[in-house]
Every structure is written in C-alpha cells, then in structure tokens.
C-alpha cells in the first residue's frame, strides 16, 4: 500500500499527542514534582524498561520470517549495549536510580498500572499477528520515544540538576530510536499490503499506546499533587 507510513503517523497523531502531553509527563517536564516524587518515576521506569527487553524477545520469537525479525533483534542488541555490558540499558538505568537515591532494584515493586502495562504488552507481543506486533513496537512505541525522552531529560537536567552522565540512559535512547523507527518503517512498507493488514497494524499501535498510558496514569495517581515550582538550581 502506498503512503502507509504517512497514514499511520496521521492516524496516530491524536493518540501520540495525548500520551506525550500526559499530565504526569507534563508536570515532570515543567519541573513541578519533588525529588521524592521523581524517585517513584525512576523506580517504576526501571521495571518497565527491563520489561521492554522482554517485549522485544517475545516479538522476535513470534515473528517467523528472519528478515522481519532482524530489526527486532538489533533493538535487543542495543538494549544490551551492543556487546558492552556497561552500556546495557539496565546498567545505565541503575546509574540513574543511584543518582536519585532510589531503592535498590531488588526492593522495587511494580505499581498495579505498571504490571497491567507489562502484561498487556507481553500478551500482544506473544500472541499478536506480525502486523499487530510491528504496530506495537514501531508506531506504538519507537515512533515517539525520542520526543518523550527529550521532554523528560531536558527537565531532569535543567530543573533537577542531574548530570548528563546520570541521564545517560535517556540520551542513549534519543540517539538510537530514530534508527529503530527507520528499521520498522522498512518492514511496514513490505508487510502492509491490504486494508486488513493496515487495520491490524493500527490496532497494535493503539493497544501499545493504551498500555503505556496506563503506566503514566499509575504514576500520576501514586505520586499525588505536584509539589509546585521545585527547580533545583
């Protein structure tokens, strides 16, 4: 199908905008949360980020054709530092957790909304069709993660005084995710041939956005009202 990439961007514009402007993300971007509230974000995001690798592994197992599996496997390789374990995203996030004085990773428990997000994405990546899985990983995630992280990291650096080294995890994603998007786009242009294919792609993307919105809803409810103007300069 022609113009599938432009079409999926247009059809998801409202969904993605709603997610990027979620009240929790916006309050964080505006520097309105206290550092104690930021701890809750960091701890829950560690759980979600670790689970993202599991989403990719399940997706790669569910995708039967090698050429469509390779970009997913390459993404897994990025998650593990491309062979350098010190750049593994889990290690980089632990660095961030230490910077915010969060709990040790063995002490962190997921919020119900975090668990619901993870359960939904795992099930989708394990049982979805090829089109649904690609929709979830690509348009439903990789398409906007760099923009989302830019909002978050700019505030953590400017408003909360965390160093670029503390925030290495986020900067790493900002640099990699556009390539992941291009890789997914190359798959989409090959696999989406009918309206039914497109409907599955769109369904997978929308489901992933719904699941991630659950995560941010949980944080918003848990941390309570913003502490106010908490710029730490």
Image (cartoon, rainbow, N blue to C red):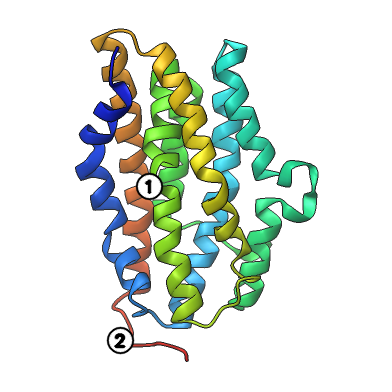
In the rendered image, residue 74, in percent from the top left (x then y), is placed at: 64, 32
Disc 1 crowd, CA 10 A, few/some/many (<14, 14-19, 20+):
many
Image: 108 above or below 133:
below
Residue situated in front as seen by the camera: 88 or 98: 88
Name the residue at 43% across, 33% down: 138
Disc 2 crowd, CA 10 A, few/some/many (<14, 14-19, 20+):
few
Identify residue for label 1: 212
Residue situated in front as seen by the camera: 74 or 41: 74
Identify residue for label 2: 228
Image: 20 above or below 26:
above
Compared across the picture, whether 103 is left or right of 10 comes to right
In the rendered image, residue 124, in percent from the top left (x then y), is placed at: 43, 28
- For the residues labelled 1 and 2, the Cα–Cα distance comes to 25 Å
Image: 223 above or below 115:
below
Name the residue at 56% across, 51% down: 175
Q: Residue furthest top?
A: 194
Name the quarter where the N terminus is drawn: top left
Name the residue at 45% across, 51% down: 146
Name the residue at 63% across, 76% down: 99
Q: Residue furthest bottom?
A: 233
- Residues marked 1 and 2 touching at CB (< 8 Å): no
Would you identify the image quadrant in which residue 66 lies? top right
Compared across the picture, whether 78 is left or right of 51 comes to right
Q: Earlier in the sequence, mark 1 or mark 2?
A: 1
Image: 193 above or below 88:
above
Residue 129 in sight here: no
Q: Secondary structure at mark 1?
A: helix
Residue 18 in sight here: yes
Would you identify the image quadrant in which residue 134 lies? top left
Compared across the picture, whether 84 is left or right of 210 comes to right
């Amino acid at each position: 199908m022609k113009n599938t990439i432009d079409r999926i961007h247009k059809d998801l514009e409202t969904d993605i905008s709603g997610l990027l402007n979620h009240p929790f993300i916006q309050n964080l971007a505006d520097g309105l949360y206290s550092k104690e509230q930021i701890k809750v974000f960091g701890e829950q995001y560690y759980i979600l980020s670790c689970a993202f690798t599991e989403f990719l592994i399940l997706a790669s197992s569910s995708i039967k054709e090698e050429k469509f599996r390779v970009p997913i496997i390459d993404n897994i390789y990025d998650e593990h530092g491309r062979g350098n374990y010190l750049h593994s995203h889990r290690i980089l996030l632990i660095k961030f957790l230490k910077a915010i004085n969060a709990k040790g990773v063995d002490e962190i428990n997921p919020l119900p909304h975090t668990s619901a997000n993870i359960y939904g994405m795992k099930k989708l990546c394990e049982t979805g069709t090829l089109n649904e899985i690609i929709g979830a990983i690509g348009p439903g995630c990789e398409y906007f993660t760099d923009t989302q992280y830019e909002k978050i990291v700019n505030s953590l650096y400017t408003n909360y005084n965390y160093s670029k080294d503390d925030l290495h995890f986020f900067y790493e994603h900002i640099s990699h995710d556009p390539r992941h998007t291009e890789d997914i786009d190359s798959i989409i242009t090959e696999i989406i041939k009918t309206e039914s294919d497109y409907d599955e792609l769109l369904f997978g993307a929308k489901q992933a956005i719904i699941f991630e919105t659950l995560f941010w809803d949980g944080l918003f409810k848990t941390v309570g009202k913003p502490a106010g103007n908490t710029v730490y300069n």
